[in-house]
Image: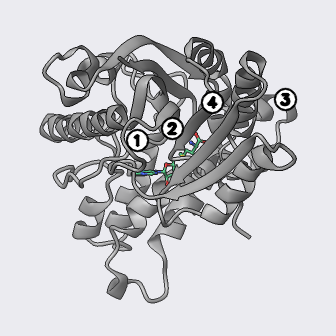
Amino acid sequence: MTKGYSEQTAGAKLCIDLASDWGKECISDLNISENVILMDYGAADGGTASEFWENIINNIHEKNQSTEITLIGNDLYSNDNQALINNLSIQSTNNELVKTFLCAGSFYDQLVPSGFIDFGFSATAMHWLNKKVENLNDHTHVLASNNQTARSDFLKQALYDWNQILDIRSQELKIGGKFLTVNLSRDNENRYLGNNGGKTVNVHDEIHAIWKELLEENIITETEYQKGTIQNFYKSPEEFISPLINKDSAAYKKGLRLIKERTVYVDCPYKKKWKVNQNTEEFSIGLMETIRSWSRHSFISALDKNNHANLNPVDILFNRLTKRISNDPENWSLDYVEHHLMMEKV
Ligand SMILES: C[S@@+](CC[C@H](N)C(=O)[O-])C[C@H]1O[C@@H](n2cnc3c(N)ncnc32)[C@H](O)[C@@H]1O
């Protein structure tokens, strides 16, 4: 049976937990009235943020115990939104002052009325490109490749998307409202999820090496090899804050301002566990499953379905990945580099 999102991504919850202090700060600066509207953008099954929202709700009620709170969970229509409703309702069950709602749709669209949100939050959801960039033909991830043309095209699209996300959020926020983002990022030493600066292998180089093996063994075609591209981009701190300091950006013009930003690091929880229990089978499967949870669709969508009646190259890819990890566990780890950004609408 396939595991749910929260079970597959132990690291994502740790990243959210590290933002709890800034969540609390956002609430302490808010003008808390009779009603407060909260929104979680790109929440997946909502399980990783359950504790975060419980704390936020407590923070609000510490300021005003009769405030009525609305918590809206958002994700795409294709998400497991039943699981999201279940996890959201943990906050409203047995608490008459809290109501929970699901808002299915893309955060590239305006999702709620203008001037509606008091506190918006999003974790590990805003690194996927909104439009495919097609020219990365010699690697599966642009940041691990040496392809400067593709890198510049990915960056351009990523900044276009980020400007759009912030523009729409500034439209949705009330004046005085806060928006806190926790996003996968690239630090000043070019470290990012999958590249911890050489402490262990670059996960993206390994994925690419296997994908190339499949081409060399004629399991996939040249076209499928080239189409196998993970369509995301991990932005630097400067790239994240750029729409907030550029006075000509749409978000800035609508009043969205930078309060503060920081980069945080989360060591691979699977590796941490392996160091204690030395259970290599559990480690290699757990690590492969978390990598597969965010990369599988990129490879599935690269395949020409007519070519693969009997064999599924994507299954082979992840089987080989598990083997590589289990043959050399010491040399594998998936460490997170996350950027925290606190914003306010003035
Ligand atoms: C890695 S999960 C993060 C989930 C959760 N926020 C966490 O930190 O554990 C990313 C989620 O973002 C959602 N997502 C991606 N693009 C989105 C979009 N344009 N609009 C809404 N949700 C989106 C995905 O469906 C996925 O559930």
Tell me, yes or no, whether the two marked residues, 4 and 2, touch with CB atoms within 8 Å.
yes
Q: Earlier in the sequence, mark 4 or mark 3?
A: 4
Residue 131 seen from this side? yes
Q: Mark 2 against mark 3, which lies toward the viewer?
A: 2
Is the residue marked 2 within 8 Å of ligand 1, measured from its CB?
yes
The residue pinned by badge 3 equals: 276
- Given the image, on which type of amino acid does mark 3 rest? Val
Q: Nearer the viewer, residue 311 or 241?
A: 241
Q: Earlier in the sequence, mark 1 or mark 3?
A: 1
The residue pinned by badge 2 equals: 124
Q: CA distance from mark 4 to mark 3?
A: 24 Å
Mark 2 neighbour density, 10 Å: few (under 14) some (14–19) many (20 or more): many
Q: Earlier in the sequence, mark 2 or mark 3?
A: 2
The residue positioned 83% from the left and 50% from the top of the image is 93
SS at badge 4: helix
Q: Quadrant of residue 306?
A: bottom left
Q: CA distance from mark 4 to mark 2?
A: 9 Å
The residue pinned by badge 1 equals: 205
The residue pinned by badge 4 equals: 16
SS at badge 2: loop
Mark 1 neighbour density, 10 Å: few (under 14) some (14–19) many (20 or more): some
